[in-house]
Image (spheres, rainbow, N blue to C red):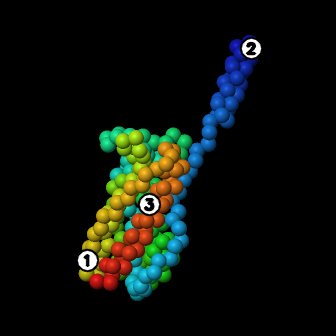
């Protein structure tokens, strides 16, 4: 009987200690990408575009927010995460930005099974916070392939962005990455417009 009471008291103490420890841990911060809804001056083309989810290595395409202090290692911010994989966030932002331009008949994602005149395939090369020589930067590099489904012609372009950060934390990195992704979708719109105008 004494053993049973002792065991019950011990379990109660341990559980209350666990709950106490849990209550003291800071909450996760969850971040997303959300580019500005800016309308660019552009020409209308009566075409449909499908935006496929970008390809990426699993080390790049993680919900973890990654930073590197050298060229061969990487670490993650312990209490900060992306709301989804960078590839999904980029697909969403590309589709949204191209849609609000009203430059095309239709812009859709790969989830919709409809015929499209052009397909955007891409590969994320870099998507991280990098420390270089006592400074730190948001780095974003993506290769884009614009496929004409009628001719099977592919037009390729590499987009690379680097922005120095004033603070070394996940929040500041995400704010600057949003800025870089806005630069990218703006450049992508211009790239598509130039390609279609040829």
Toward the viewer: 112 or 39?
39
Left or right? Give the position of 59 relative to 173: left
Toward the viewer: 47 or 141?
141
Which mark is first along the chain, 1 or 2? 2
Snapshot quadrant of residue 76: top left
Tags 3 and 1 in contact by the CB under 8 Å rule?
A: no
From the top left corner, tell me how far across and down residue 119 is, in percent.
35, 73
Q: Mark 3 or mark 1, which is nearer to you?
A: 3
Tags 2 and 3 in contact by the CB under 8 Å rule?
A: no
x 48%, y 61%: residue: 179
Left or right? Give the position of 30 relative to 70: right
The residue where tag 3 is placed is 180
- Label 2: which secondary element: loop
The residue where tag 1 is placed is 152
From the top left corner, tell me how far across and down residue 167 is, in percent.
51, 46
x 27%, y 73%: residue: 155
- Label 1: which secondary element: loop
Label of residue 1 in the image = 2
């Amino acid at each position: 009987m004494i053993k049973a009471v002792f065991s019950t008291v011990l379990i109660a103490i341990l559980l209350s200690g666990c709950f106490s420890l849990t209550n003291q841990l800071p909450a996760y911060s969850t971040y997303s990408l959300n580019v500005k809804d800016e309308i660019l001056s552009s020409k209308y083309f009566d075409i449909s575009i499908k935006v496929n989810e970008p390809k990426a290595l699993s080390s790049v395409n993680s919900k973890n927010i990654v930073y590197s202090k050298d060229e061969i290692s990487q670490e993650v911010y312990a209490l900060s995460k992306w709301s989804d994989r960078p590839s999904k966030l980029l697909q969403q932002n590309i589709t949204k930005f191209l849609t609000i331009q009203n430059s095309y008949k239709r812009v859709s994602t790969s989830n919709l099974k409809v015929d499209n005149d052009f397909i955007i395939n891409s590969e994320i090369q870099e998507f991280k916070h990098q420390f270089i020589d006592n400074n730190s930067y948001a780095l974003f590099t993506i290769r884009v392939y614009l496929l004409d489904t009628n001719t099977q012609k592919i037009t390729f372009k590499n987009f690379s962005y680097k922005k120095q950060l004033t603070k070394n934390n996940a929040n500041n990195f995400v704010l600057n990455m949003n800025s870089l992704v806005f630069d990218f979708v703006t450049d992508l719109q211009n790239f598509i417009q130039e390609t279609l105008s040829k």
